Amino acid sequence: MVLRFLASRPVVRRPGAAPARPRRRSPLAPYRRLFAAPGALAFTLAAFVGRLPGSMLGVSTVLMIATVRDSYALAGAVSATGVAVTAVAGPLLGRLVDRYGQARVAVPAVVCYVAGATAMVLCVHLGAPAWTLFCCAAGSSGVPSLGSMTRARWAALYRDDPAARHTANSFEQVVDEVCFMAGPALAMVLCTTVLPEAGLITAAALLFTGTLLFAAQRRTEPPPGPRPARGRALLTPGLRVILTTFLATGAVFGSMEVATVAAVESFGHSTASSAVLALQAAGSCAAGLVFGALPPRGTAGGRLVTGVAAMALAVLPLLAAHSLATLAPLLFLAGMATAPTMITGMTLVHRQIPAARLNEGMTTVYTGLLIGISTGAAAGGWTVDHLGATSAYLTPVTAAAVAFAIAWAGRSRLRAGAAPPP
């Protein structure tokens, strides 16, 4: 009876006793919850195998042609042809994915790419005429966008959970940064120490394997949407703002890479270029992980404008860097503004277009980013050649200012076009 009486009494804190401390939430808790969904880890790992080659293709092609044919001009022209055709083929593939499903489009697309890449390697190795290289570049540009398809899977898995979608977009941006950090380095090692063709062969093999493994994960594949109405996702006013902002943002990335290489060489540390560029990607990775673990605040349009403004401000101090010791931490800080901006941009893409056109919209935006990177790299190279390495960062500073101006001018369209996520 005494035990029963004691058990029935309410638990009262003793006077003067310290209140119980709330349990601290682990910063990794949102990511653990994200991968609790069945099949999430499997399609993420498969997609990573296929996404890593994306940043290897351009470097591998340029190094292979420049080494074997002894012409950087030819290598750059062939690479530019591939980028131009990809800009057209990417959104079309995204539209087909929305209509027919990921596996039915990605597998034939990667088979076509591997055929074109194999033809490119054979033409370079056997000394075929230069025009054949342009044909191969055009034929191998239909690369399936596994990054867009993984984001579409997250959106389908957590269609009713905005917090989980925010964490998923953050994680995907970190994966992009890791790929862009590791891919070019791997390509350079393969092309310079194994064979000039080894980089492209390895990239094609990884892309083929990763795409097949990803397509095999059918239980997490979103079902094809209904036949979309006439018109394109690009006609959405809000999406046009995001696309043009990403074009200018891509120009920041492309020109900053060229400017950093030129600046490091002018400091007398040419071998440290890769490590210094990796610091920028590391800053973006760190910011992306933290940003994904925190709940988003304010409107997505406001966060995009704030992120682009932070990116423009973070690039400015690079103009005053006159040694490797000052450049390295400034690049790390500049990289920290990248991930939140890109994550918010992709969140807005989800909200600006219908679910039946999600892949088309994301692929269109990423294609714009790719074009911006190529244009920025060319503009950055012109700046270095004509104004010198000390003025190399003028191009990314200008591009960042343009990106902010576009985002600021279009902020009302982002608010007006925003709709609840599908």
Image: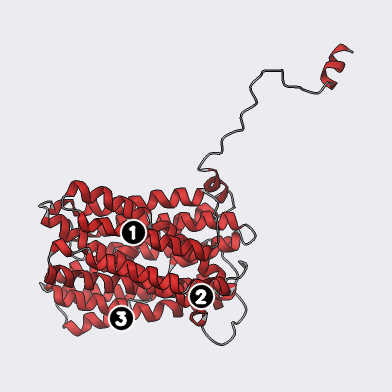
For the residues bearing labels 2 and 3, Cβ distance under 8 angstroms: no
Q: Nearer the viewer, residue 383 or 111?
A: 383
Report the amino acid beneath label 1.
Leu
Q: Quadrant of the C terminus?
A: bottom right
Q: Viewed as shown, does residue 66 lie left or right of 224?
A: left
Crowding at dot 1, Cα within 10 Å, few <14 / some 14-19 / many 20+, comes out as: some
Query: Residue 77: where, in percent of width, then height?
Result: 21, 78
Residue at the spot 24% in from the left edge and 62% down from the top edge? 257
Distance (Cα) linking label 2 and label 1? 24 Å
Q: Of circles 2 and 1, which is in front?
A: 1
Q: Which residue is mark 3?
A: 138
Mark 1 falls on what kind of element? Answer: helix
- Which is nearer the N-term, disc 2 or disc 1? 2
Q: Which residue is mark 1?
A: 313
| Residue 336 position in % (x across, y down) | 37, 53
CA distance for labels 1 and 3: 38 Å
Residue at horizontal 14 percent and vertical 70 percent from the top? 66
Q: Within 10 Å of the Cα at label 3, are there few (<14), some (14-19), or many (20+) other Cα atoms?
A: many
- Residue 230 pos. (x, y %): 56, 87
Q: Amino acid at mark 2?
A: Gly
- Residue 306 horizontal/vertical position (percent): 44, 61
Q: Earlier in the sequence, mark 2 or mark 3?
A: 3
The circle drawn on residue 238 is: 2
Residue reaching furthest to the top: 2
Against 303, residue 68 (above or below) is below
Whether residue 157 is visible to the viewer of this picture, yes or no, is yes
Secondary structure, mark 3, is helix
**Distance CA(mark 2)–CA(mark 3):** 31 Å
- Who comes first in sequence, dot 1 or dot 3? 3
